[in-house]
Image (cartoon, rainbow, N blue to C red):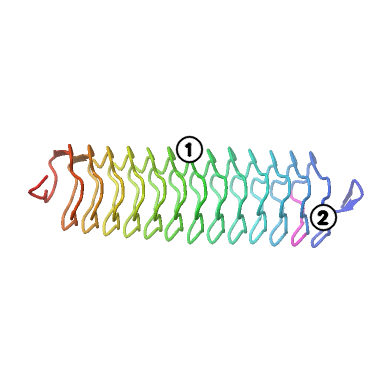
Amino acid sequence: MNINGYELKPDANLVNADLSGLDLKGINLKGANLVGADLRNTDLSSANLCHANLYGARLRYTIFDGANLKDINISACDSREAVMRGVDLRGANMVGIDLTFADVSNSNLSDANLYGARLQYTVFKNCYFIDAILKGANLDGANLENAQLPNVDLQYAHLDDAILKNVNLENGKLCNAYLFSVNLTNADLTGANLTGVNLTEAVLEDTNLLNAQLLNSNLEYTNLTNANLTNANLEGVNLMGAKLYVTDLTNANLTNANLTNVKTYGVFNLPRRI
């Protein structure tokens, strides 16, 4: 296919090409070199871009619904408000991408690298992030409801006011993450490492924190109603003003925890000093 003087085919050299505003639904650009290309407002629904290189491409408002982006390089791209629903992004290089206000719902980002990505208010509902890297990413206000994130790396990530209802974060790495006012209702954080995290005013109702590590974390005014903290390490945790209603603290380690003004009701295995 030849459009605007560009030969659009697998492995094509399209460096800095202007393909903005085009209807390219279903096109095969597997392995193409699109470094620095302008694809703003372009419709790439159901396109094949696996192994393509779009480093630094301009992807604002681009539509990728149902596209194959497996092992793609879209690092350092401006993809604000892009539409990427139901996309295969397994193994994608997305380091430093800007997906602010984008819709990436129902997509598979397993093994993807989103180190330092800007993902504020992005929609990731029902997405898969198995073994993905989100270290240092900014997910403030993002919606990850029902997402699967086992073994994910979210160390030093920002998730203030994010929605993580019903997520699976089993064995996740969240050391020193910022989770102010996050909603983790009914989330599974079994075996997760939350050392040094800020969970101030977070909602963890019905959350499973079995065997979780929360060493020196801040859970000030956090809602832990019906949460499971069995065998959790809460050493040095700040629980000032936290709500512990019907919370299970069986074998939890509360050494040097700050329990000032903790609200309790029906707590299982409540330590005597609370």
Left or right, residue 7 beside residue 24: right
Depth check, front residue: 42 or 182: 182
User: What secondary structure is the magenta-colored segment mainly?
Assistant: loop
| Image coordinates for residue 42, horizontal then vertical, percent | 75, 41
The quadrant of the rendering that contains the C terminus is top left
| Image coordinates for residue 165, horizontal then vertical, percent | 39, 42
Residue at (41% x, 46% y) in the render: 178
Q: Which mark is residue 15?
A: 2
Residue at (73% x, 45% y) in the render: 58
Residue 220 in the image: above or below residue 234: above
Residue 217 in the image: above or below residue 171: above
Residue where numbered disc 1 is placed = 141
Q: Secondary structure at mark 2?
A: loop
Left or right, residue 181 beside residue 254: right
Residue at (45% x, 49% y) in the render: 147
Callout 2 crowding tier (Cα within 10 Å): few <14, some 14–19, many ≥20: some
Depth check, front residue: 213 or 150: 213
Rounded to the nearest angstrom, the CA distance separating label 2 from label 1 is 34 Å
Which quadrant would residue 220 be assigned to in this image? top left
Q: Amino acid at mark 1?
A: Gly
Q: Secondary structure at mark 1?
A: loop
In magenta, the rendered stretch is 26-32
| Image coordinates for residue 134, horizontal then vertical, percent | 51, 54
